[in-house]
Image (cartoon, rainbow, N blue to C red):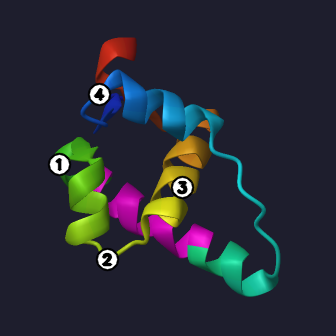
Amino acid sequence: MSTNVISAGSTFVQSSITTIMGSMSGQSINDELERACEKIKEVLDSTGSIDLPRIVQELKIPIDIAIKAINKLRQLGYVKFENEL
């Protein structure tokens, strides 16, 4: 199995991604998070890598949801940062 890579662009962004844990409540927020994870996984499955600007700009995922989705995918072992390889 190949390793998927997230390019966050800087150590600051990486540390932000691992520590942002805003209050998410309500089914619509959870649904949005799940949709974001699926969109990110689709790109990763086809290309093997993605970066945060592309997630926000091309996939039209809000930054807070994008960060939570990346963190969730990291917790599941689906992606790693470039410096974790």
Q: Main secondary structure of the magenta part?
A: helix
Magenta residues, as a range?
33-44
**Of the image marks 4 and 2, the number of the one nearer the N terminus:** 4
Badge 2 marks a residue whose secondary structure is loop
Q: Nearer the viewer, mark 1 or mark 3?
A: 3
* Residue type, mark 2 in image: Lys
Residue 80 is left or right of residue 56, and the answer is right
Q: CA distance from mark 4 to mark 2?
A: 21 Å
Give coordinates of residue 35: x percent, y percent.
Answer: 52, 75
Q: CA distance from mark 1 to mark 3?
A: 18 Å
Q: Nearer the viewer, mark 1 or mark 2?
A: 2
**Of the image marks 3 and 4, the number of the one nearer the N terminus:** 4
* Residue type, mark 3 in image: Ala
Q: CA distance from mark 3 to mark 4?
A: 18 Å
Residue 85 can be seen in this image:
no
Q: Residue at x 71, y 56 (%)?
A: 22
Q: Is residue 39 magenta?
A: yes
Q: Based on the displayed image, in which of its 4 quarters is residue 82 positioned?
A: top left
Q: Is residue 70 magenta?
A: no
Can you identify the residue that label 2 sits on?
A: 60
Q: CA distance from mark 4 to mark 1?
A: 21 Å
Which label is found at residue 10?
4
Residue 32 can be seen in this image:
yes
**Of the image marks 4 and 1, the number of the one nearer the N terminus:** 4
Q: Residues within 10 Å of mark 1 (few under 14, many from 20)?
A: few
**Of the image marks 1 and 2, the number of the one nearer the N terminus:** 1
* Residue type, mark 1 in image: Thr
Which label is found at residue 47?
1
Can you identify the residue that label 3 sits on?
A: 69
**Of the image marks 2 and 3, the number of the one nearer the N terminus:** 2
